[in-house]
């Protein structure tokens, strides 16, 4: 058998890169899985299913979810806050009631309106609301003078013989609950004294103690004693105010009272420190005069300029120990010159 030869042509079509791009989609969109949009319903379904598996605290926890939500909701208010506030109000009312029961409006033995002396000393206390209120200034002060008159007693009546004041043992007085100090405005009405008004009335002038104004040491010494006396009056008045506001900031009847007490306490403390600095300076000059040496006006003037006109700050010139000597009652700070109130007699010491 004879075969006939046949020529078969085989061809291959080749596409260029540009032509192939137009015919074939070479992206991966068919094999990449797209992320579905968030579904709130599914989220909460998952949340319910995972509720007990979520930690209470930590980065991915119930606490984190709560705090994040609170931060997002600007006006969020926890319903329990109202309940807590109501419970706090009830606590305040109960504490006030307990205080009424423990500290009745009137003491069992010392009725309201009673004025008592602590062991017969010069510190007087007025009973009000079952509490003792210390009289600012004590026995010789203007507060007691006004109160004594309002109680129907004469100024000349002896405090104890007339029964205007009763003597009570110190340990008993100290156990009676303490109330705010009693000052002149509490009796006579009007506004309380301010630090400024006290300074205007009592603040001695440094200039009057300047040796340049005098012809002799003797003349200057007399003027200095007057300045020292006025400086003591200022310090004493400020010290009483300081004690009063120290009491008020702790025992004021309302928060506003206590707040005002704190403000005046800071202000009075600052001015009291200045008054004591002035007394220390006067004392140094006085001691120089009383030293018995050959003291001249020139020598006094040099010391005065160093203390009052020099560039050195008071904190360097005057030590805390020197100022501390003028705290409370003091006897003999300036040699024969005495100041303050004797706690036993209630009398003021001045010169001599």
Image (tube, rainbow, N blue to C red):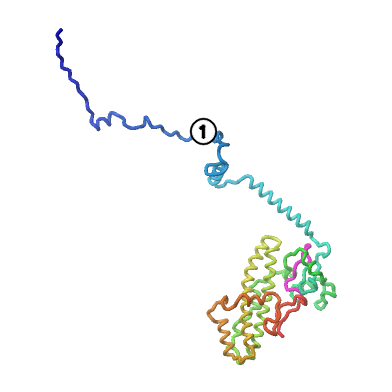
Q: Quadrant of residue 183?
A: bottom right
Q: Residue at x 67, y 64 (%)?
A: 249
Q: Position of residue 313 (x, y in %)?
A: 55, 77
Q: Position of residue 107 (x, y in %)?
A: 81, 62
Q: Residue at x 66, y 85 (%)?
A: 225
- In this view, 87 is above or below 280: above
Q: Position of residue 142 (x, y in %)?
A: 74, 75
Q: Which residue is most to the front?
A: 1
Asked whether residue 319 appears in the rendered view, the answer is yes
The one nearer the camera, 88 or 4, is 4
Asked whether residue 145 appears in the rendered view, the answer is no
Classify residue 83 as left or right of residue 57: right
Q: Which residue is most to the top?
A: 1
Q: Which residues are magenta?
A: 127-139
Q: Quadrant of the N terminus?
A: top left
Q: Residue 134 colored magenta?
A: yes
Q: Residue 106 colored magenta?
A: no
Q: Quadrant of the C terminus?
A: bottom right
Residue, disc 1? 42
Q: Quadrant of residue 263?
A: bottom right
What element does badge 1 sit on?
helix
Q: Position of residue 336 (x, y in %)?
A: 70, 85
């Amino acid at each position: 058998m004879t075969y006939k030869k046949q020529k078969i042509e085989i061809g291959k079509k080749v596409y260029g890169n540009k032509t192939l791009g137009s015919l074939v989609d070479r992206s991966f969109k068919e094999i990449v899985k797209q992320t579905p949009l968030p579904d709130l319903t599914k989220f909460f379904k998952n949340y319910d299913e995972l509720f007990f598996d979520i930690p209470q605290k930590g980065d991915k926890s119930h606490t984190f979810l709560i705090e994040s939500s609170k931060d997002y909701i600007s006006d969020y208010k926890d319903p329990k806050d109202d309940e807590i506030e109501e419970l706090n109000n009830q606590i305040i009312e109960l504490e006030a009631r307990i205080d009424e029961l423990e500290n009745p409006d009137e003491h069992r033995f010392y009725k309201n309106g009673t004025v008592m002396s602590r062991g017969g000393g010069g510190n007087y206390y007025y009973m009000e609301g079952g509490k003792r209120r210390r009289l600012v200034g004590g026995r010789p002060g203007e507060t007691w003078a006004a109160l004594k008159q309002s109680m129907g007693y004469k100024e000349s009546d002896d405090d104890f013989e007339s029964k205007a004041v009763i003597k009570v043992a110190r340990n008993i007085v100290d156990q009676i609950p303490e109330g705010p100090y009693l000052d002149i405005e509490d009796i006579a009405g009007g506004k309380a004294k301010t630090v400024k008004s006290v300074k205007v009335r009592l603040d001695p002038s440094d200039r009057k103690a300047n040796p340049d104004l005098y012809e002799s040491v003797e003349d200057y010494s007399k003027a200095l004693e007057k300045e020292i006396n006025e400086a003591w009056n200022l310090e004493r008045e400020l010290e009483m105010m300081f004690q009063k506001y120290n009491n008020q900031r702790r025992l004021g009847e309302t928060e506003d009272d206590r707040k005002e007490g704190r403000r005046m306490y800071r202000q009075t403390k600052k001015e009291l420190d200045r008054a004591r600095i002035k007394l220390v300076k006067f004392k140094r000059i006085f001691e120089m005069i009383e030293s018995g040496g050959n003291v001249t006006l020139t020598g006094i003037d040099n010391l005065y300029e160093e203390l009052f006109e020099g560039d050195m700050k008071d904190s360097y010139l005057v030590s805390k120990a020197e100022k501390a000597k003028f705290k409370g009652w003091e006897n003999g700070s300036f040699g024969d010159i005495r100041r303050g109130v004797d706690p036993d007699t209630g009398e003021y010491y001045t010169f001599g």
